[in-house]
Image: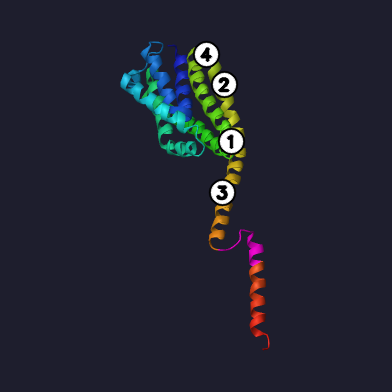
Amino acid sequence: METVELISLTLGVAWASGINLYAAVLVLGYLGMTGEVTLPPGLELLSNPLVLGAAGFMYMVEFFADKTPGVDTGWDVLHTFIRIPAGAVLAAGMAEGLEVSQAAEFAALLIGGGLAATTHLTKTGTRVLINTSPEPFSNWTASITEDLVVIGGLWASLHYPWLFVAGLVVSLLLIIWLMPKLWRALKRVFRAIGEFFAGKKDETMGTPPSSQSGTTSRQDILRALYHDANNAPK
């Protein structure tokens, strides 16, 4: 592979790991097994049938978990501790093929972890918003689209490296632009969830769910009426 192709694939693997790690490992292992890509020594094990089988099994688990509203968010939260470190390690392993210094490999580790974190957090936040929709079709569509984007993106990073790098830069700029809006939307969702459970708690305690000021006002009125009734002349 030429240097630009290896750099593009290094960035592609880190980017894809934050979206669907197991699909990324499957694609990379398959490319290495078929000889389309010469994997660096540290990543040759990805083409091992045992690794491919494990990645394929976990991909099938994620395939169904990722399409179940609510379960997908729990799955994404759990994979915060898996996708990001794996993306960093895969990027550093691919950089090893460039025969660069250890400092450059460590830089690839940092960049890979940052890319994986960016795509992972974007996916996780977007899925929380999608789960507010009662119908499951938007969830399925998002999940299938993500799988296709990962496979297509890795293929493009190998065959059209400059086009992939340009698309990656554009997507990162789009994510930076969307992040504040996504964060505000997530805060509204979490606030609504908090108010929902606060209302449930009020119902359990026998207090009708309402605004705090309204509830306080009614309590003051009832307390005054009770006081007047007790002090009324007999």
Q: Nearer the viewer, mark 3 or mark 2?
A: 3
Label 1 to label 3, Cα distance in Å?
A: 18 Å
Nearer mark to the viewer, of 1 and 3 = 1
Among the two numbered marks 2 and 1 on one chain, the one whose residue lies closer to the N terminus: 1
Amino acid at dot 4: Tyr
Mark 1, residue position: 135
- Precedes in sequence: disc 3 or disc 4: 4
Residues in magenta? 206-216
Tell me, for residue 167, which label it has, or none: 2
The N terminus appears in which quarter of the rendering? top left
Is 169 placed left or right of 48 in the picture?
Answer: right
Q: Residues within 10 Å of mark 2 (few under 14, many from 20)?
A: some
| Residue 175 at x, y percent in the picture | 58, 31
Marks 3 and 4, how far apart at CA: 44 Å
Badge 4 or badge 1: first in the primary sequence: 1
Q: From the image, tell me which residue sits under label 3.
A: 193
Residue 215 within the segment the image draws in magenta: yes
Name the front one of labels 2 and 1: 1
| Residue ID for mark 4 | 160
Which amino acid, mark 2?
Gly
Distance, label 4 to label 1, CA atoms, is 37 Å
